[in-house]
Amino acid sequence: QAQLVESGGGSVRAGGSLTLTCAETTGRIFSHYIMHWYRQPPGHEREWVASIRSSGTPSYIDSVKGRFTISRDNRKGEVYLQMNSLEPEDSAVYYCQAEPLGSGFPVWGKGTLVNVSS
């Protein structure tokens, strides 16, 4: 099955930007997956943030619309989350998930921590 590794997390001040990257490391045909970003703030449940279909069609949770941009490079096997105008409420561990088209189970990465200070 696919294996995912997230990177790009860190600490920034409110208003700053970060770009997260999720790489599929086994060489699976990346275009066979819908890719998602989720996040889990401290003490809260994991929530969906954004998705992108193989065609490139994106969708977002309302709280990040206009600030976050999801994109993917099927040739490289990577998905990105460009995060601008970050707010302290965006602080969380961010996870990517690969949802296979057709049969199979979703696969999760181990997450990358984003901390936004006011």
Image (spheres, grey):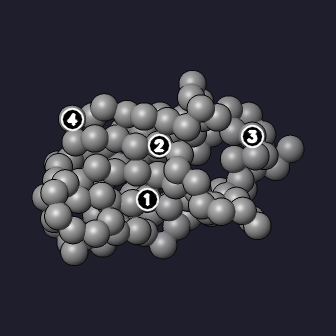
Disc 3 target residue: 87
The mark closer to the camera, 3 or 4, is 4
Taking the image as shown, residue 39 lies to the left or right of residue 95, namely right
Q: Secondary structure at mark 2?
A: strand
Query: Which quadrant of the figure contains the C terminus?
Result: top right
Q: Is residue 103 left or right of residue 81?
A: left
N-terminal of the two: label 1 or label 3?
3
User: Label 1 vs label 3: CA separation?
Assistant: 20 Å
Mark 1 — residue?
Answer: 96
**Residue plotted at (34% across, 68% down):** 107
Q: Is residue 84 above or below residue 7?
A: above
Q: Residue at x 52, y 67 (%)?
A: 111
Mark 1 or mark 4, which is nearer the start of the sequence?
A: 4
Q: Check disc 1: other Cα within 10 Å, few if <14, some if 14-19, many if 20+.
A: many
Where residue 117 sits: x, y (%)?
A: 82, 49
| Number of residues whose C-alpha sits closer than 10 Å to that of mark 4, classed few (under 14), some (14–19) or many (20 or more) | few
Q: Amino acid at mark 3?
A: Glu
**Residue at (58, 54) in percent of width and height:** 47
Amino acid at the residue labelled 1: Cys
Front-most of 19 and 64? Answer: 64
Q: Give the Cα separation between the discs numbered 4 and 1.
A: 18 Å
Asked whether disc 2 touches disc 1, contact meaning CB atoms under 8 Å apart, the reply is no
Q: Earlier in the sequence, mark 3 or mark 4?
A: 4
